Image (cartoon, rainbow, N blue to C red):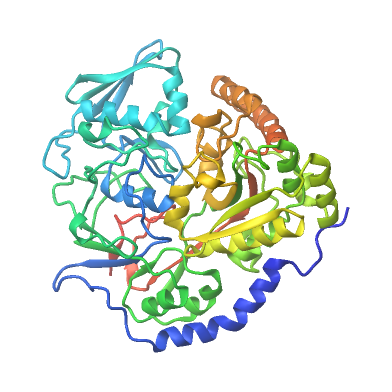
Amino acid sequence: MMPHPPESHSMRRRTLLATGTAAALAAALAVPRLAAAQGQPGRRVLRFVPQADLALLDPIHSVAFVTRNHSLMVYDTLYGWDAALKAQPQMAEGHTVSDDGLTWMIRLREGLRFHDGEPVRAQDCAASIRRWQTRDAFGQALAAAQESVEAADDRTIRVRLKKPFPLLPDSLAKVGTHICAIMPERHATLPGTQAVPEIIGSGPFRFVANERVPGSRNVYARNDAYVPRQEPASYMAGGKTVHFDRVEWTTIPDGATAAAALQRGEVDWWELPNIDLVPQLRRARGVKVDILDPNGSVGFWRPNHLLPPFDNPAIRRAILRGIVQRDFMIAAAGEDTNLWRVPYGFFAPGSIMASDEGMEGFRNPASIDATRRALEAAGYRGERANLLASTDFPVINALSEVMGDYLRKVGINLDYVSMDWGTVTQRIQNRGPVAQGGWNSMVSWTAGSAQVNPAANNLIRGHGERAIFGWPTAPELERLRNAWFEAPDDAARAQIGRQMQRQCFEDVPYVPLGQFFSPTALRGDLDGMLKGVALFYNIRRT
């Protein structure tokens, strides 16, 4: 079967954008300067443009990465991944494990305090772990092995297990959504589906709630009471030393406006610039461009497994079989093949779990006509299906446009629903029918570091309504995932990886669209940026 015609949707889109980018940027540079506040005189202020609007503030209530980034400023975690993705003590001073591996005693560092001045107690931590476990896949794996988590005293958390769980620190250190954010017990006892009433953590920044302007502005002040660890900063681990008094987040949906603001020095850091504007930013005086996450990002199409037509696995398989990952990567990251990788399966290349199992489909995708026939054979009869598309998140918007074009071409009766990212993140929590605000499919991306194994990869879970949005039911995937936790060595884990990938091509919990490496752009006088996600400690102005 022949692949899609050479002139794909993403290539046409790229050509149009290339011809219009220079004019748009020139126009943006000519408009009046941003009216946003530029900080207080005499104070060290970092002005930041986030990847999308911060619509939801609670890290357990929301799966959005922009919420995760906000949470990593305000909240701290018991453990943190270092640059090698190894769990290191963070709020924890250390831990001991009983000889049988069934009792963990985690000791808190001395002097930890929440932003309201109250001490951080083991009771707060135990309640925070339990709340996190109601929402996070890795946390749920720990909960399944766990008998109890409680406070032995004010500084000691006791975790009793039914069976050994050596990955306990890794689960508490994970950087993908949801992070195990430590919050006051009064907040941690709320259901994970209910947002906390105020944002109080013990992290290096305080959230300045009275300066929040939804859809536009969020402000963080340095937590002067925060005591960093003594080790050098390494990703989420080590000493979180803050060099700015304030960090001001300004949402700027229009890429040309954000680029102009960065070049004029009105903002200091643009997290994810539109890929079409990156060449101009590389040439701009006083601006530098770097890769934010060396582990990359993974685009994906997520169907809702609860509603027709995508509750039918044969329909999902037909859609996957015709996907041309290259089209999506050009839309997300441009023509430079150094900025993306295809074919890409269900686990990160280079990880123990990655394999070539089933990858022939991505190497030789089905033609449009063949995909139409496969959909008809699978039982698709023209049912209306929506695709939620975020217009204010450039990368997701680009991926969504390519997906929408593909679905129309293969014969899906598509309702392309454009909305802002904040609304998308709220709507995908709705399990009801489309007529009651539900949804059929959406496009987003996740961190490559979250796909190194099935514990970190929330999208691969197949436990129905307990899974994250999309709610796939895939018993064999769950069985294999559980076997991974019991595997005695890397050889056994690699074999399970092959089996899980083979099963993913059958069940299609989601469709991977490729791995891309997103540039970030910042003023040339900023130094010390840590790689991985947008982190606001260690970075300084030289």
Residue 389 shown left or right of residue 383 in the figure:
left
Pick the residue in front: 452 or 270.
270
Q: Is residue 107 above or below residue 217?
A: above
For residue 212, above or below residue 25: above
Residue at image point 44% right, 34% down: 136
Identified at 57% across, 51% down, the residue is 442
Of 166 and 49, nearer the camera is 49
Most extreme residue toward the bottom, as rendered?
A: 30
Can you give x and y, in whole percent of width and height, for residue 541 in the image? 27, 68
Rendered location of residue 33, percent (x, y): 32, 83
Q: Total of numbered circles in the picture? A: 0
Residue 20: which quarter of the image?
Answer: bottom right
Q: Is residue 253 above or below residue 233?
A: below
* Image quadrant containing the C terminus: bottom left
Q: Residue at x 62, y 59 (%)?
A: 340
12 or 314: which is nearer to us? 314
Q: Which of the 4 image quadrants contains residue 262?
A: bottom left
Q: Position of residue 448 (x, y in %)?
A: 54, 47
Is 213 on the left or on the right of 139, as rendered?
left
Left or right? Give the position of 441 relative to 466.
right
